[in-house]
Amino acid sequence: MTAQSVRTQSETALQNVTVLGTGVLGSQIAFQTAFHGHPVVAYDISDDALAAAKDRFAKLADTYRAEVDGGASGGADAALARIRLSSDLADAVKDADLVIEAVPENPAIKADTYAKLAAVAPEHTVFGTNSSTLLPSTLAPSTGRPAKFLALHYANRVWQHNTAEVMGTEWTDPEVYRRVVEFAESTGMVPIEIKKEKAGYLLNSLLVPFLQAAGELLVDGIAEPEAIDQTWRIGTGAPMGPFQIYDVVGLTTAYNISMMGDAKQQAFAKLIKERYIDQGKLGVATGEGFYQYG
């Protein structure tokens, strides 16, 4: 590699990162990125949300000490030091080379977020959506920079399930796509390059129908979550059943995705809301969902 090519790669690398949304997955994305040496700004809409995020980051640091660096390297403490919190969008993105959006899985919320982001982000900034199910092309017009926009999708427990699905649209600049792939590699992820748009990418194209089938079994009164999960674990050797996965993903996300489905999925969303969300039972993050934790 020549000195010129090294300079070019350095100049175009995505270094400064802002993550919009500090929920379960947004906080993980921010911490994983900081753990691998990138300065990160974690943005959320209120100081209360950022206070909750601070607690999530502290718990993630404990997890990384135990599961990633063995507590020996000091990597978790260094990651915490690289994360800055902000509830001011303009401030949060002022130096960003890459903004990773991880706001609720609701088209209207995402479109509004991108409209506000486009007004304040630097011209060079690349936008990536972590949407689980929405096609990036449906959001691209809201970004004001479709050539610098694509999907960058992470799986829960990113330090362990370290795939990063990269999916562009017909407008995405191939150079931007390449830089995002390189960024994913730089943060310890395995880039999964998707050749064309597909709702759900690869992972959720496989996972969501599985989870939906479980939800329909519950709605139809066929069996309770414990029996459904037990059947799956015993029959396949999988470590978790679908309702355990729902709890890890978070029931708010499950609700939002189910509301975009057919009548049966909307019935499942109603069940989740009435029995769990309205009672403050959001899954692992709150200590209770379909199961109790802690």
Image (cartoon, rainbow, N blue to C red):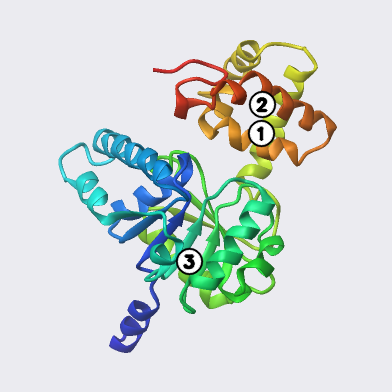
> On the picture, is 223 further left or further right than 237?
right
Q: Nearer the viewer, residue 148 or 120?
A: 120
Name the residue carrying label 3: 180
The image position of residue 125, as x and y in percent, is 47, 73
Q: Amino acid at mark 2?
A: Lys
Q: Dividing the picture into quarters, in which one does residue 8 lie?
A: bottom left
Name the residue type under label 3: Val
What's the distance in space between the residues labelled 2 and 1, CA to CA? 7 Å
Judge depth for marks 2 and 1 and give the one in front.
Answer: 2
Q: Label 1 near label 2: C-beta < 8 Å?
A: yes
Image quarter (top left, top right, bottom left or bottom right) of the N terminus: bottom left
Assign a secondary structure to mark 2: helix
The residue tagged 2 is 273
Indicate left or right for 197 with 163 as reference: right
Q: Is residue 255 left or right of residue 77?
A: right
Q: Residue at x 76, y 19 (%)?
A: 219
Residue 183 numbered tag: none
Residue 86: percent from left, percent from top: 37, 55
The amino acid type, in three-letter code, at marker 1 is: Tyr
Name which of mark 2 and mark 1 comes first in the sequence: 1
